[in-house]
Amino acid sequence: NLVESGGGAVQTGGSLKLSCVVSGRSIRTYATAWFRDVPGKEREFVAAINWSGGSEYYEESVKGRFTISKDDVKRTVYLEMNDLKATDTAVYYCALGERWYTSAYHYANRYEYWGQGTQVTVSS
C-alpha cells in the first residue's frame, strides 16, 4: 500500500514536499518514482531513483527544481519541489517497481504498485 501526502495549492515560485509512505514491503530493493497526471495528457514521468538510491533521474522540465529521495528505514519516498510553475499543476503519483530498468525507468508500465495520488495546484 502506497499513500501520498503533501500536495496542496501554492503560488508560482513556491515549494512543496510530497511524501509517499509504503506499507507491507521494504523499499530497499525497489525502484521508486513519481509520475503526474494532467487532464487530457498521458501520465508523465517526473523523477525516479534506483533501489540503492545512488542514481536519480528527472524529466527535463523539472531538473534543478525537483529532488527525489527515499528513506529505507521509514519506507518513505519524497519529492521535494521548488520554484513551482503553473505547468506543474497535476495529480502526483508515487510508484514502486520490482525491477530497475536502466533505459525504461520513465515508463509507467514498469511499475507494479501505485498510490492514490495527491493534487498539486500552482497558481499565479
Image (tube, grey):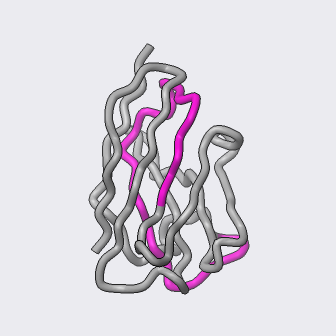
Q: Position of residue 16 (x, y in %)?
A: 44, 38
Q: Residue furthest top?
A: 124
Asked whether, in this view, residue 102 is left or right of residue 77, the answer is: right
Figure label count: 0
**Residue placed farthest to the front in the image?**
73
In which quarter of the view is residue 51 placed? bottom right
Identify whether 60 is placed above or below 24. above
> Does residue 53 appear to the left or right of 120 in the view shown?
right
Counting from the top left corner in percent of width and height, residue 49 is at 61, 67
- Between 49 and 45, the one lying in front of the other is 49
Pick the front one: 42 or 60: 60
Q: Quadrant of the C terminus?
A: top left
At 32% across and 69% down in the image, what residue appears?
2
The question of residue 82 being in magenta is answered with yes
- Which segment did they paint magenta? 78-104
Q: Residue at x 40, y 49 (%)?
A: 92
Tell me, yes or no, whether the highlighted magenta stretch contains residue 40: no
* Position of the N terminus by quadrant: bottom left
